[in-house]
Image (tube, helix red, strand yellow):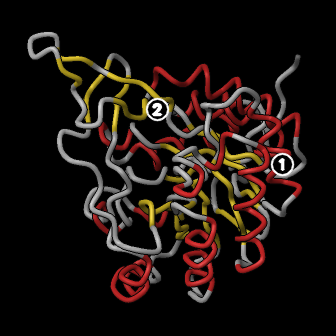
Amino acid sequence: MADISVNIGGLRMKNPVMTASGTFGYGPEFADLVPIEEIGGIIVKGTTLHPRQGNPYPRMAETAQGMLNCVGLQNKGVDYFCEHIYPEVSKIDTNIIVNVSGSSIDDYAECAARINALEHIPAIELNISCPNVKQGGMAFGVTCSGAADVVRAVRERYHKTLIVKLSPNVTNVADIARAVEAEGADSVSLINTIMGMAIDIEKRRPVLSIATGGLSGPAVKPVALRMVWQVAKAVSIPVIGLGGISNAKDAIEFLMAGATAIEIGTANFIDPQVTVKVARGISEWLDAHGCRNVSEIIGALED
């Protein structure tokens, strides 16, 4: 059987498959449906320094080959996570990774620092697609300087594996990736959702409460695959690919494009066991093709 373990910075994973933030709760919610210990890593829903109510309903809409969401990072805040969620998730025999979001650099840094103190959380994923309230709502991750500023501040206070989640809503994602690498990111994950909208033609109104939302699912896969390929060639740190991955074939495409690991998001809503099926499928494909280690296919795309 092929060895499918991978390393992301100092993070050792039993296989390269993770859950994408916001699509798998905190993990235990799925314990009756899937053997969660077989997943390489569980990235929990977005966590902020202070509690957030999220956006009004409706905030999800089905689209052709995907879905739109504008949940708005609803969560009870990092202190609630530390006191009530952490004691439960710390017992799961896999990597629990916290997705950290914020509206200011100080918020990001303080939230990361509090998670840094948790022994059994080996990594965070920094969502830099959040609006910077001090800069008129512009997302940190859409400029090299904004991305660099928040990563620099977090790196000073967070000392474990730091994954930075990149926005696709930029001119050149490779430039953003290089900027966060220079400030100490151990890895980058991409892509976050693509901005989109849906309209109810009978009501003549947007379907989502705030008009626009993030598009995810199979529809975004070609875009995600292209961006992962570009970034993997631009940086020396590990790349984590996500966006429309629904099966082992999809995952292997991302690995060949240069991703060291992958995340599965929207497909969890269709099949809660998809992560484990994909991990097993990767192993079976490697065995069938005479590969002894998953590293043999990472970045193996022939240009």
Where is residue 168? Give x, y as percent.
Answer: 62, 32
Q: Residue furthest left?
A: 202
Q: Residue furthest top?
A: 201
Where is residue 284? Give x, y as percent.
Answer: 60, 39
**Secondary structure type for disc 2:** loop
Quadrant location of the C terminus in the rendered image: top right
Q: Nearer the viewer, mark 2 or mark 1?
A: 1
Q: Where 274 sits versus 117, above or below?
A: above
Q: Amino acid at mark 1?
A: Ala
Q: Are marks 2 and 1 in contact (CB under 8 Å)?
A: no
Circle 1 residue: 179
Where is residue 121? Give x, y as percent.
Answer: 57, 78
Q: Which mark is residue 246?
A: 2
**Secondary structure type for disc 1:** helix
Tell me which numbered mark, 2 or 1, is placed earlier along the sequence.
1
Q: Where 10 sits versus 57, above or below?
A: below
Q: Quadrant of residue 97?
A: bottom right
In this image, 279 relative to 162: left or right? Answer: left
Which residue appears at 40% of the width and 74% of the height? Answer: 50
Q: Nearer the viewer, residue 242 or 246?
A: 242
In this image, 290 relative to 87: left or right? Answer: right
Residue 263 in sight: yes
Q: Nearer the viewer, residue 60 or 43?
A: 60
Which residue appears at 35% of the width and 51% of the height? Answer: 72
